Image (spheres, rainbow, N blue to C red):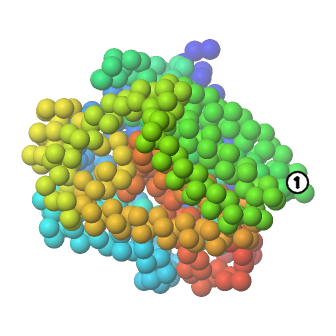
């Protein structure tokens, strides 16, 4: 098959997937398409790079520092569109922030960090852009059926990006593959900038398409969902294949763990003893930590999954970037660590532009205070999820799965405070309901039926 024929076929398949999805789901508001564009752009390569027609995404200290006007205007338009949607829906942002205090304090801390930031203007622009993610989350939560909206945005993202990733890898290798600057190896990147991003896309796709497949199977009474079930199975297989092609050990491990937890929580014996399970997990982690002091279990595990004990040189990177942290209490400001002369020095000396650890990344930008607020947010979220597990719904199981995957994934990758699908998903599952007046507070675990009428 020629590349042009493959492109036409792939485009037709994606259109068919979106068409069937939009006609089999109640989640079809205009606002959801804005959120879909936001999520899809964050899960793929930068928007401006598509105009260069090259798989090589320009990486340099100057480019990273200065930003890109195309990117800025693109995200600004989405933020403004999202803002007006919230105004039209009369969403009370204040009520949401008050009911989600840990997230509010974490977000506010980054905003206030402009005051002491090394580069206030850069920090302010990056924080404004990051705040757009909160707006997108609010759009999802203010839908008539928030659960369906949340699930369908990520499923449709997989419907678009997974087929086109396969297309680029197979038929447009100059776009879908690139050579690593570090070891010269050939990487499959698909629609993303590098292999770990492709792995993250596949990870999120597997989890959400699996969730959607379970929901479709439970709705057998609707014959039109049979085609959706077939599409879901096809995309699920394609996502697993993409995960394999990415060779991203972190995403592979998180996918296996996430699916295991999600499926295990559907077993009655575990659901009825969730507190005992949580206690057993804590004891197990403490035992593993203690055993690791005598036997290097971490190194053995990394070798087992095909990675060296340095986590592909990550443990060598961490001490280097820590040397440049000069504000251990409050940090240099939101995403201000990677800016100015410090960014130039690190890039020129080591060709490093990220820490490959979400917790370390938070410390580099926000110091001990930032890490403390992040941990408070994670603890607050898991407490809510723990209380929600007693309702024994699919969503409560998915909440725990997403939380666990994000917490583990950020040990070797940085997805906190980014546009990654994992961070957006974590923000949604962390939210306390009801945040908006049209949501029924008596409905357990957000299992909300689609209310009649009213397209938003």
Q: Residue at x 63, y 82 (%)?
A: 438
Q: Residues within 10 Å of mark 1 (few under 14, many from 20)?
A: few
Q: Where residue 205 sits: x, y (%)?
A: 60, 43
Q: Where residue 130 sits: x, y (%)?
A: 35, 60
In the rendered structure, the answer to whether residue 106 lies left or right of residue 140 reads left
Which quarter of the rendering shows the C terminus? bottom right
Quadrant of res 64: top left
Q: Secondary structure at mark 1?
A: loop
404, above or below 47, in the image: below
Q: Residue at x 39, y 74 (%)?
A: 104
Q: Where residue 443 sits: x, y (%)?
A: 72, 78
Q: How many marks?
A: 1
In the rendered structure, the answer to whether residue 434 lies left or right of residue 303 reads right
In the rendered structure, the answer to whether residue 279 lies left or right of residue 189 reads right
Quadrant of res 189: top left
Quadrant of res 416: bottom left
Q: Residue at x 48, y 48 (%)?
A: 290
Which quarter of the rendering shows the N terminus? top right
Q: Residue at x 45, y 27 (%)?
A: 307
- For disc 1, the marked residue is 220
Which residue occupies the extreme left position in the image? 341
Q: Nearer the viewer, residue 149 or 209?
A: 209
Q: Nearer the viewer, residue 34 or 355?
A: 355
Which residue occupies the extreme top position in the image? 1
Which residue occupies the extreme right position in the image? 221
Q: Where residue 100 sits: x, y (%)?
A: 47, 76
Question: Could you tell me if residue 148 is visible in this image?
Answer: no
Question: Could you tell me if residue 260 is visible in this image?
Answer: yes
Q: Nearer the viewer, residue 237 or 249?
A: 249
264, above or below 53, in the image: below
In the rendered structure, the answer to whether residue 116 lies left or right of residue 104 reads left
């Amino acid at each position: 098959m020629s590349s042009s024929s493959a492109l036409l076929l792939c485009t037709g398949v994606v259109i068919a997937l979106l068409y069937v999805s939009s006609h089999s789901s109640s989640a079809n508001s205009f606002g959801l398409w804005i959120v879909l564009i936001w999520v899809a752009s964050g899960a793929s390569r930068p928007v401006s790079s598509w105009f260069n027609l090259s798989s090589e995404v320009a990486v340099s200290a100057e480019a990273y520092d200065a930003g890109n006007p195309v990117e800025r205007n693109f995200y600004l338009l989405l933020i403004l569109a999202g803002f007006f949607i919230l105004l039209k829906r009369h969403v009370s942002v204040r009520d949401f922030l008050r009911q989600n205090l840990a997230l509010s304090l974490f977000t506010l801390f980054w905003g206030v960090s402009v005051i002491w930031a090394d580069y206030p203007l850069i920090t302010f622009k990056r924080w404004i852009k990051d705040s757009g993610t909160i707006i997108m989350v609010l759009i999802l939560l203010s839908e008539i059926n928030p659960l369906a909206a949340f699930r369908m945005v990520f499923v449709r993202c997989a419907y678009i990006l997974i087929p086109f990733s396969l297309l680029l890898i197979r038929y447009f290798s100059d776009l879908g593959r690139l050579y690593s600057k570090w070891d010269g190896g050939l990487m499959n990147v698909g629609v993303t900038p590098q292999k770990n991003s492709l792995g993250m896309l596949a990870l999120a796709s597997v989890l959400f398409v699996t969730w959607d497949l379970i929901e479709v199977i439970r709705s057998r009474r609707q014959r039109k969902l049979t085609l959706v079930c077939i599409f879901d199975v096809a995309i699920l297989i394609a996502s697993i294949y993409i995960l394999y092609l990415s060779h991203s050990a972190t995403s592979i491990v998180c996918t296996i763990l996430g699916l295991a937890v999600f499926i295990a929580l559907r077993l009655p014996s575990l659901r009825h003893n969730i507190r005992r399970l949580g206690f057993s997990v804590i004891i197990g982690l403490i035992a593993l930590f203690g055993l690791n002091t005598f036997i290097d279990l971490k190194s053995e595990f990394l070798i087992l999954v095909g990675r060296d004990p340095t986590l592909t040189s990550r443990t060598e990177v961490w001490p280097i970037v820590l040397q440049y942290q000069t504000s251990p209490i409050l940090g240099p400001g939101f995403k201000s660590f990677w800016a100015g002369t410090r960014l130039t020095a690190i890039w020129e000396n080591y060709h490093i532009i990220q820490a490959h650890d979400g917790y370390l990344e938070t410390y580099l930008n926000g110091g001990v205070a930032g890490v403390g607020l992040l941990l408070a947010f994670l603890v607050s979220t898991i407490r809510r999820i723990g209380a929600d597990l007693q309702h024994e719904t699919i969503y409560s199981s998915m909440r725990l799965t997403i939380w666990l995957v994000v917490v583990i994934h950020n040990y070797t990758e940085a997805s906190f405070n980014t546009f990654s699908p994992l961070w957006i998903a974590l923000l949604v599952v962390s939210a306390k309901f009801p945040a908006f007046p049209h949501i029924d507070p008596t409905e357990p675990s957000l299992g909300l039926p689609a209310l009649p009428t009213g397209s938003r």
